Structures are given as C-alpha cells and as structure tokens.
Image (spheres, helix red, strand yellow):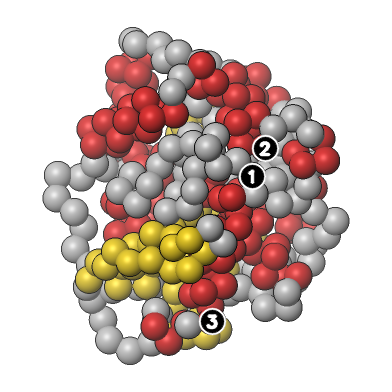
C-alpha cells in the first residue's frame, strides 16, 4: 500500500530539505527543529480535558517535571504514565501535548507525561532511571492520581515505547505487574538486524542512519549495554507475566520489524496482546493524527484497545 496521501504531503515538505546527520548536529538544534515541526502539525486548539497541571516528582538526579492530565469526570479512574518519543534526544511535555490530551479524553484516564533526561548529555541509564522513578512514585501515590490501584498502565512511542516496555518488565520483576502497556512503534532491539531497516532506510522521516546515530548517542557501543533488556527489551530472558500489551507499528518505519517481533515474543509467552502494523503509515504517526485521517483512525483504535484493558 502506498504512503497515506496526507502523510505523503508532509514527507514532500520534509524531504525537500534534507537534514544533516544527527550525530553531527547540536542537540539543541535538533530539539528546536523538533519543536518547529511539531508546532506545524499541532491541532489549532488544544483538546479539552478536565484539568492540566505541571508539577514534579522525585527522581534519582533531582525533581522530574511531569504534566498531569485529568479527565472531565468524577470518581476513581485508571492512570497512564506516558513517556514521549524523540530518540532519547528530543521531545518534551509540549511535543506530545495533543497526544496526551487525546489519551486522557479517549481512554478516560489520568495521564501523567514524564519529561525525562535526554541524551547525549544524559545517556543510558538516565532516561530509564527517570521513567522508572516516576512510575514508582505514581504507583505508590495512586490516590493522588487516578485512584484505581489495579489500573495503572505505561505508554510511549518510539524511544518512549522502549522506556515503557523496560518499565513494564521491571514492574513484573518486582512482583507488581501493570494493568496494561501501550507501545507505539517501539524501539526494542539495539543489536538485531531487520529487513524494515533497509526497506525503509530513507525518505520516511526516520532513516536507517538516524537509528544508528541515535542508538550510539543513547547507549554507546558496548554490546553488553546495548544487549541488556533495559536497552533492548526484546533481549529479556522471558516475557511471562507481563502486562497486557497494545502494540502499533507502521508499514514505512525502520523500527517496524522489531516492534512486531516484540509483539510476537509476548504473544508466544501467553501475554494478552493486541498488535497491528498500519499500512500506509510512517514512524511518528501518533503525532500525525491532526493532519492524517489514516493516522487518526490508527490512534483511535490503539486508544480504544488500551481503554478496553483498563476498563
């Protein structure tokens, strides 16, 4: 299936100005480019929710900024801890504001977005440590958030999907499994080789070279680090007992096959998994729902599946 026409128009604009290599670019420049691109794709008016609060939670290196979205309804509700994408290099609470507002509204849950430390200034394990600390804090003080102790989930896209998967594995190992995990085109394997990396090597926002540069800046080159399950969740020894998973990947994404492989590994371990690879879509489609009906339909389905597992 060809690229969704609405997304093809976005790609034409992006590809008209080829970007320099990530590894050769000042991280602050990358972050500003990410902000500008996000602003151009954002909804004209923010999605209304009950309330939005910027605050902090304790972390291993100081206070971690978080943004708490509360639905417009009373009584205890599920809680979703959200980790944004951006290759562990870019992204913040604003870059995914449309995404998290919609999640709060559609899932009818409190959503806590986490502004974890970014590479290369803070390489692995900084982002993982921050996300785990935030999830622990929210789980231990659930009455201050959604209030349903048995309905805590993690979610994330791309790098955030990687972090969500790693946090879910940790919670399982700690004997406190989560109610669900939403992983959207997650990075799951830093040491594997997949056909989708070469099939979608260039022209679809995230290139094969981008993936290699990002992996180096986040986790370095030590095989023991890159192959650890905290960096490569697909390399975990077992997946039994993990939280029910909703996993979405995209046809034109270098990360497609490793995301699909993670869904298959969880399914083989007896985990409840909803998995779909969306034809015609690209990496970052979670942020493209304001401009693409196909991306909008995918987000609708993924959020509905998450809501079902949290109901």
Using the image, determine if residue 7 lies above or below residue 199. below
Q: Are marks 1 and 2 in contact (CB under 8 Å)?
A: yes
Location of residue 280 in the rendering, given as x and y in whole percent from the top left corner: 46, 31
Distance from disc 1 to disc 3, alpha carbons, whole Å, reads: 25 Å
- How packed mark 3 is, by other alpha carbons closer than 10 Å (few <14, some 14-19, many 20 or more), is few
Which mark identifies residue 180?
Answer: none
Reading the chain from its start, which is encountered first: label 3 or label 2?
3
- How packed mark 2 is, by other alpha carbons closer than 10 Å (few <14, some 14-19, many 20 or more), is many
Residue picked out by circle 1 = 124
| Image quadrant where residue 150 sits | bottom right
**Label 1 element class:** loop
Residue at image point 44% right, 60% down: 64
- How packed mark 1 is, by other alpha carbons closer than 10 Å (few <14, some 14-19, many 20 or more), is many
Image-based side of 188 in relation to 133, left or right: right
Q: Are marks 1 and 3 in contact (CB under 8 Å)?
A: no
Reading the chain from its start, which is encountered first: label 1 or label 2?
1
Location of residue 241 in the rendering, given as x and y in whole percent from the top left corner: 75, 71
Which mark identifies residue 219?
Answer: 2
Distance from disc 1 to disc 2, alpha carbons, whole Å, reads: 5 Å
Location of residue 28 in the rendering, given as x and y in whole percent from the top left corner: 38, 30
**Label 2 element class:** helix
Marks 1, 3: nearer the viewer? 1
Which mark identifies residue 140?
Answer: 3
Image-based side of 137 in relation to 113, left or right: right
């Amino acid at each position: 299936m060809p690229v969704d026409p609405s997304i093809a128009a976005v790609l034409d604009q992006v590809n008209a100005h080829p970007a320099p290599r990530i590894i050769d670019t000042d991280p602050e420049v990358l972050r500003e480019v990410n902000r500008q691109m996000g602003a151009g794709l954002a909804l004209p008016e923010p999605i209304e929710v009950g309330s939005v609060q910027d605050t902090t939670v304790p972390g291993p290196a100081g206070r971690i900024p978080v943004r708490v979205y509360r639905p417009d309804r009373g009584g205890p509700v599920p809680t979703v801890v959200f980790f944004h994408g951006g290759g562990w290099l870019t992204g913040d609470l604003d870059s995914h504001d449309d995404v998290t507002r919609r999640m709060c509204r559609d899932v009818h849950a409190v959503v806590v977005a986490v502004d974890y430390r970014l590479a290369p200034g803070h390489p692995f394990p900084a982002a993982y440590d921050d996300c785990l600390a935030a999830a622990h804090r929210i789980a231990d003080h659930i009455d201050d958030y959604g209030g349903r102790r048995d309905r805590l989930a993690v979610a994330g896209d791309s790098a955030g999907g990687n972090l969500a998967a790693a946090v879910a594995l940790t919670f399982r190992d700690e004997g406190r499994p989560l109610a669900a995990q939403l992983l959207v085109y997650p990075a799951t394997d830093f040491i594997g080789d997949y056909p989708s990396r070469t099939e979608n090597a260039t022209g679809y926002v995230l290139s094969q070279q981008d993936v290699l540069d990002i992996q180096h800046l986040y986790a370095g080159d030590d095989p023991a680090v890159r192959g650890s399950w905290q960096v490569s969740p697909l390399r975990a020894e077992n997946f039994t007992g993990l939280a029910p998973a909703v996993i979405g990947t995209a046809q034109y994404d270098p990360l497609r096959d490793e995301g699909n492989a993670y869904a298959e590994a969880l399914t083989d371990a007896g985990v409840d998994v909803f998995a779909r690879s969306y034809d015609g879509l690209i990496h970052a489609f979670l942020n493209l729902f304001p401009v693409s009906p196909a991306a909008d339909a995918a987000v609708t389905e993924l959020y509905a599946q998450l809501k079902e597992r949290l109901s």
